[in-house]
Amino acid sequence: MPRLLLMVALLVLTAAPAIAETVAFTHAHVITVSGDEIVDATLIVENGRIKAVGPADKTKVPRDATVIDATGKTIMPGLVDTHSHIGGFRAADNSSPIQPGVRILDAVNVFDSGYRRAVAGGLTTLNVMPGSGFLSSGQTIYLKMRGITGGAVRPEDIAYLDRNGRVMGGLKMANGTNSMRKPPFPGTRGKSAFLVREKFIAAQEYMAKIEAADGDADKLPPRDLDLETMAEVLRRERVVHHHTHRADDVMTILRLKEEFGFDVVLHHVSEGWKVAEAIAEAEIPCSIIAVDSPGGKHEAIELRFETGAVMAEAGVLIAYHTDDWITDCRLFLRMAAFGMRGGLDRRTALESLTINGAKMLGLEDRIGTLEKGKDADFIILDGDPFSVYTQVLETWVEGRRVFDRSNPEDLLHAEGGQGVGRDQVPFLCCAGQGGES
Amino acid sequence: MKQLLILFMLLAAGAQAQVAIKGGVVHTMDGPAITDGVVVVTDGRIAAVGPATEVDIPVGYRVLEAAVVTPGLIDAHSTVGLSGIYNVPADQDMLDNGGPVQPELRAVDAYNPVEALVDWIRSFGVTTVHTGHAPGVPVSGQTMIVKTRGTIVSEAVVNEAVAVAATFTPPSFRLRGPDTPASTRAKTVAMLRQELIKAREYARKHAEFDGEGSPPARNLRAETMARVLDGDLALMITAHKVRDITNALRLADEFELRLWLDGAGEAHQLLPAIKAAGVPVLLHPTMTRAFGSTESVSMTTAAQLAEAGIPFALQSGYEAYVPKTRVVLFEAAVAAGHGLGFEAALAAITSEAAKVLGIADRVGSLTVGKDGDLALYDGDPFEYTSHCTGVVIEGEVVSEIVR
């Protein structure tokens, strides 16, 4: 009986505040990202969506709303991490270099404590991807940090679903050295591109057969999960998230895109600053990483803080990512701040953590800015988002608080402490891979 | 003609060694910060420090200006110069596969002063580094202290041997480490105790040699461990878990060693014991990834050590992949934002680091007579969006990159 009581108590606690409740945050510094920053703003949340946001003197607080005084605090959209490995990093196995039919969906552990770290850092949307030691290591998944402190059990519980109720995600691909290994993996860049071209051609032929069958089940080719996924890519129903570092590797992707036609987001793009104009011309968005030092692998020795600024200047849509574990998701704000250190303007820096990532995931209608009708995913900070002295105080997803720094357990995930990383498995893709990392 | 050119260059270099640095705020780390301060460096040493109204800049000095001026930063533990940017066998000299206990390996024989990562950390204001053989095997070799300058190692060296590097905690990354026979904690401690006992015998034999007959044969391993027993070299033990830290303290107590506790991921569980032992801590990078031996690291441990009054310094540590090196400025910044605060965080990479490493007579504060090592910033050095705008080592402007 006491146990039952405890469970009821827990349910009540974790459910608060109720989703139907109207909550008004008043007198906050609000960074909507869609418009100018508002120094004294009101944000109203209802039914998991943003009901209103605007200057305090022009935004009426509903009579039944729970009012939270946010004086001295900054509110901005929940952060969108376009490249993460939290809770799942292996999809393909080592049997072959291209395995697009394999899904990270089947590998994600929603109980991974990394998600608690993610919300401590203000992340509300993650593109969780399998690693880069493959030309294609499988399908990625777009996750929403709802219910990760209780309630979520299956990846589907936290996944974004498309209009047809299908789990959303892209296709992870990679070039450069990570995917160069012993046969059957490619040993050179030329072989890497050849294998990818061969697969795309197979997918074209697969699509042609399906079209020729014209609905006749007897004439349909046998279902092939790899080619089916590649066909989705060729039909532009699934975006390619492409790991790449060196400028020549970037140009190889542009060449393949030109030949086959597909939507692609370039990830890491360490030498993107060398070919920013070409990337801009091809209208390819880039998700960038900034790490504390260049190198660690041959193809990242010319990684620079200036990459974001140079590419944004050229007209490339840019976002940042954590690549957690490569960098810590609790410090994602620092990533765009480093972009600013390298010359990026504040506005683009803010966009690069929110709406630009949302665009790369095709979620810009739902998240990425604080605008009426969008999901109520936002974070509350105790200072400027780009200051080292600022902490994320609260993270809200769909109108529910999923991180509260004043809660000791949440604080433990935010700061670290005894035993908190016990379930964590190191994933530094390709580190120590035959000394050719 | 050529000789004349060389003479001219020498003169120019000499003239360049006379430099004055004006700062909107000068954090001397030896007394309160000075608003509108000036630091005069003559012949490589600090000749004067004070408010601009009181300190005259001698005629002919090169003058640098910055919003914020600090002492050159000290990285209390790194492997840069032994571990290189490419991360391929050709540039990784921080761990040798020859055996589990090799204190005889000298850092001075492995350090590459023109390594790109040395330039990288220097461009953020790091002027002094404690670097050498890496954690990962029971005893990996010696460590040394260098300035981030020079093209040959002798131009960089401050002290060519300061510690022997030992590891008591199962290494987090066994990427290039040998398949060591010391696969358990107890075996690691046993091996080290045995080496220390051998060294004691060795030292006794050599001390007793009366000059008659042939002297006892030299053994570089025992010789090095004898220096550890003497306290001439510190024993730096990388230990994260409570058990490992406890083992390190026990060993130091048994042999009366000068211990530097390195890493210390669970130091927050043992604050009274560490304080009682009077052992300084070279604390793990603030942003260390939490898993395995480091599962309990906290970004607040630095603040907890400060609160407990335990002497400590911050470090960039050893990284096996990306990033190939951390930057101690960034590690201090995150610690500053997690309870340590500006002053104590800056001390942990300047004055306190110098004390812990035993080099406070030369570096760590802007004090008359100390080395003219300074870092210049266009704002709070810890803010992500600030830049380091200049670096001076012993009066020489070694970096003017804005980064």
Image (spheres, coloured by chain):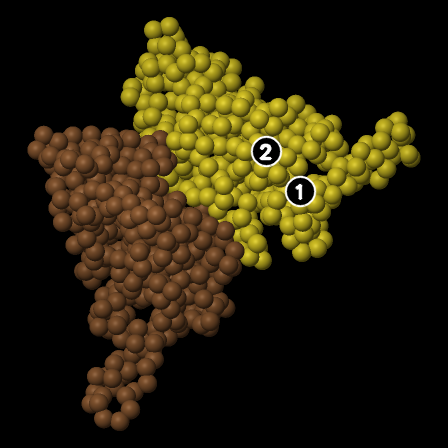
Chain colours: A yellow, B brown
- Local secondary structure at mark 1: strand
Which residue is rendered at x = 38% and y = 18% of the image? A30
Q: Nearer the viewer, mark 1 or mark 2?
A: 2
Q: Is residue A138 left or right of residue A83?
A: right
The N terminus of chain A, quarter of image: top left
Mark 2 belongs to which subunit? Answer: A
Residue B337's tag is none
Label whose residue precedes the other's in the sequence (1 or 2):
1
Task: Say if B39 sits above or below A360 in the image.
Answer: below
Which residue is rendered at x = 36% and y = 63% of the image? B107
- Local secondary structure at mark 2: strand
Q: Residues within 10 Å of mark 1 (few under 14, many from 20)?
A: many
Q: Is residue B328 visible?
A: no
Q: Is residue A13 left or right of residue A281?
A: left
Task: Say if A420 sits above or below B171 in the image.
Answer: above
Coordinates of residue B369 in the picture (x, y in percent): 13, 49
Tell me how far mark 1 sits from mark 2, CA to CA. 14 Å
Mark 1 belongs to which subunit? Answer: A
Callout 1, which amino acid? Ser
Q: Is residue A120 left or right of residue B47?
A: right
Which residue is rendered at x = 70% and y = 55% of the image? A183
Callout 2, which amino acid? Leu
Coordinates of residue A93 in the picture (x, y in percent): 66, 50
- For label 2, the residue is A266
Residue A136's tag is 1
Coordinates of residue B215 in the picture (x, y in percent): 28, 88
Task: Say if A341 sits above or below B247 in the image.
Answer: above
Coordinates of residue A9 in the picture (x, y in percent): 40, 35
B249 vs B34, nearest the viewer: B34
Which residue is rendered at x = 25% and y = 45% of the image? B11
Task: Say if A216 sits above or below B278 in the image.
Answer: above
Instruction: Name the residue at the front extreme.
Output: B1
